């Protein structure tokens, strides 16, 4: 298998107590992360949270003010970029416009002084890996944006780095192309076995591609986990909010039963709630419930109890989205609550602005947030 021949051993990255100051501005604030070999790892966060700075420190373009960076156990923080078995793909590809596809892909290998025959073999292998067969002799300027991005990827993979750093590499592409490149990147990562560290501010992109995600804000890592953990078990409000649509409710903890807490809503209904492993919730806490885990129902049809219909209120907005409809409900205590329901083909879903509704919850949908 040609593509398997590229299988390098993906590197493990250990970052400990990383701080980065630019003058008197702190861009990275005491970050520690373990990135595993062969992992597709994503740094996710809003603009300015420090993710690019972290990536540039792994690459060697920036030095940490404090802290250590190890690759497979060896300290690399003081090595020059070209001394590290690490390569970077940037958003703006930075291809050489006067060179062909093959010359671009082989450029790094030529600089390293590799023998001609070896360069030709690697370039052929890379062209196959990124599905650009037959285009090796074309000037890169004749390629589409998506194809140019593949050339940039092939060029970065050609020297067989242990780690590939990708800084928002898809953000210049239109939505359709971006979606197909997401799948492509994921395939390249698993076929090569190279550790990918990917930077994005797009939560959907992060959830789609990553083995694990670190969510960052204000220079700090807020949570690290698999996509489902980041989405379904957010540890704090920032993470819950950044990753998707949310409903926050203030509740009272009644009891802890193993890995669940039992919490009481304003209506008196009690529901189970998961919580971050490092806290033992008590007293008043905030829970988050995703809109797709709730369902609006007519009031007054059956003798509803708070336990069967734990929330109720009035519809104040209806947003039709094709696949789903969003109902914005004002609860009796004035809190806003969003319900997302899948649409059937039988016409608009039943509620209008001003309708009183009850809200049913699926089983085990609540997550307690850290203060
Ligand atoms: P973006 O997605 O916008 O690139 P980011 O999360 O990658 O955001 P960084 O580029 O890491 O953020 O920047 C973090 C903060 O550090 C920003 O406030 C930025 O202005 C600042 N910063 C980055 N590089 C420098 C520098 N060389 N000098 C001064 N400040 C810098």
Image (cartoon, helix red, strand yellow):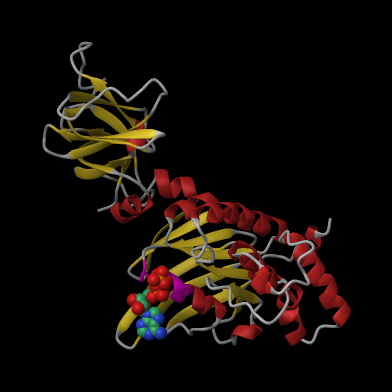
What residue sits 85% from the left and 76% below the top? 118
Position of residue 213 measured from the top left corner of the image (x, y, whole percent): 48, 57
Q: Which quarter of the rendering shows the N terminus?
A: bottom right
**Relative height, residue 78 to residue 219 (above, below):** below
Please identify the residue farthest to the left as the structure is shown.
Answer: 333
Is residue 266 in view from this perspective? Answer: yes
Q: On the picture, is 110 further left or further right than 88? A: right
Position of residue 200 measured from the top left corner of the image (x, y, whole percent): 46, 63
Corner quadrant of residue 60: bottom right
**Relative height, residue 252 to residue 236 (above, below):** above
Corner quadrant of residue 96: bottom right
**Relative height, residue 114 to residue 158 (above, below):** below
What residue sits 76% from the left and 74% below the top? 102
195 or 155, which is in the foreground? 155
Query: Which image quarter has ligand 1?
Result: bottom left
Please identify the residue farthest to the front as the structure is shown.
Answer: 142
What residue sits 85% from the left and 71% below the top? 121
**Relative height, residue 140 to residue 60 (above, below):** above
Position of residue 285 measured from the top left corner of the image (x, y, whole percent): 22, 44
Q: On the picture, is 4 further left or further right than 308? A: right
Please identify the residue farthest to the right as the structure is shown.
Answer: 117
- Is residue 79 covered in magenta? no
Is residue 161 in view from this perspective? Answer: no
- Is residue 48 covered in magenta? yes
Position of residue 340 measured from the top left corner of the image (x, y, whole percent): 33, 34
What is the magenta range? 47-54
What residue sits 83% from the left and 59% below the top? 2
329 or 307, which is in the foreground? 329
Q: On the picture, is 261 further left or further right than 73? A: left
């Amino acid at each position: 298998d040609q593509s398997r021949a590229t299988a390098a051993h993906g590197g493990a990255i250990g970052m400990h107590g990383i701080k980065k100051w630019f003058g008197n501005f702190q861009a990275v604030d005491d970050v520690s992360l373990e990135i595993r070999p062969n992992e597709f790892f994503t740094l996710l966060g809003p603009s300015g949270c420090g993710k690019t700075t972290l990536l540039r420190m792994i690459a060697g373009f920036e030095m940490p003010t404090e802290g250590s960076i190890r690759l497979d156990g060896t300290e690399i923080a003081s090595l020059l970029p070209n001394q590290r078995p690490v390569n970077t793909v940037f958003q703006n590809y930075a291809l050489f416009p006067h060179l062909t596809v093959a010359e671009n892909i082989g450029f790094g290998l030529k600089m390293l002084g590799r023998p001609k025959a070896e360069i030709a073999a690697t370039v052929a292998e890379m062209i196959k890996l990124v599905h650009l067969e037959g285009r090796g002799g074309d000037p890169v300027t004749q390629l589409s944006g998506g194809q140019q991005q593949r050339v940039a990827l092939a060029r970065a993979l050609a020297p067989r780095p242990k780690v590939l750093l990708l800084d928002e590499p898809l953000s210049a592409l239109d939505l359709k192309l971006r979606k197909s490149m997401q799948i492509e990147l994921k395939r390249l990562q698993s076929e090569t076995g190279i550790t990918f560290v990917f930077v994005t501010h797009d939560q959907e992109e992060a959830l789609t591609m990553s083995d694990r995600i670190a969510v960052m804000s204000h220079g700090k890592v807020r949570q690290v986990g698999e996509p489902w953990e980041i989405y379904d078990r957010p540890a704090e409000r920032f993470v819950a909010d950044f990753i998707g649509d949310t409903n926050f409710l203030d509740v009272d903890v009644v009891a802890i039963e193993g890995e669940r807490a039992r919490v009481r809503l304003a209506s008196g209904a009690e529901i189970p709630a998961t919580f971050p492993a490092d806290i033992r919730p008590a007293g008043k806490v905030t829970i988050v419930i995703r809109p797709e885990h709730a369902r609006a129902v007519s009031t007054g049809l059956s003798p509803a109890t708070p336990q069967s219909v734990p929330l109720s209120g009035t519809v104040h907005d209806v947003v039709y989205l094709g696949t789903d409809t969003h109902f914005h409900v004002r609860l009796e205590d004035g809190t806003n609550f969003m319900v997302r329901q899948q649409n059937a083909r039988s016409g608009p879903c039943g509620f209008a602005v001003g309708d009183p509704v009850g809200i049913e919850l699926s089983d085990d949908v609540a997550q307690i947030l850290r203060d």
